[in-house]
Image (spheres, helix red, strand yellow):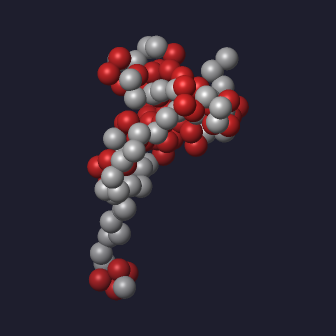
Amino acid sequence: MNDNLHWLDVPEPWAVPERVKYKVIILTRRCLIGTAPQYLAAYCVPVSDMAQRRHLRSAAGNQLVVLSYHLNSCDLLAFSVLGPTLWNSLPLLLRDMH
């Protein structure tokens, strides 16, 4: 139907372009190695640093804690949610900091 009317498709608000994902992952890595601002690094907490989650499988996989969020597009695109979510979606080989 959009072809007949010559309308442009509107992207979904939670669809993040690949270049933005890359930059967020790089910023998340900088938070983990200590070269990012402290206010952003506070959102990048490894699962292994939390006492109640140390025994989980995700603690051994260098995953980050994803804060809870409401189901709207603004919360999904916040660094506190998007950074750890994208970091956790990387393969273990790329998440390994050593």
How many labels, in total? 0
Q: Quadrant of residue 67?
A: top left
Q: Quadrant of residue 55?
A: top right
Relative to 13, residue 10 above or below? below
Residue at image location 38% in from the left, 36% down from the top: 80
Residue at image location 35% in from the left, 56% down from the top: 71
Q: Residue furthest front?
A: 52
Image quadrant occupied by the C terminus: top right
Given residues 52 and 41, the one toward you in this image is 52
Q: Quadrant of residue 92?
A: top right
Given residues 44 and 97, the one toward you in this image is 44
**Residue 44 point in image, percent of width and height:** 45, 27
Res 91 visible: yes
Image quadrant occupied by the N terminus: bottom left
**Residue 70 point in image, percent of width and height:** 33, 52
Given residues 75 and 91, the one toward you in this image is 75
Relative to 16, residue 22 above or below? above
Res 20 visible: no
Residue at image location 46% in from the left, 14% down from the top: 34
State left or right for residue 11 relative to residue 34.
left
**Residue 39 point in image, percent of width and height:** 32, 21
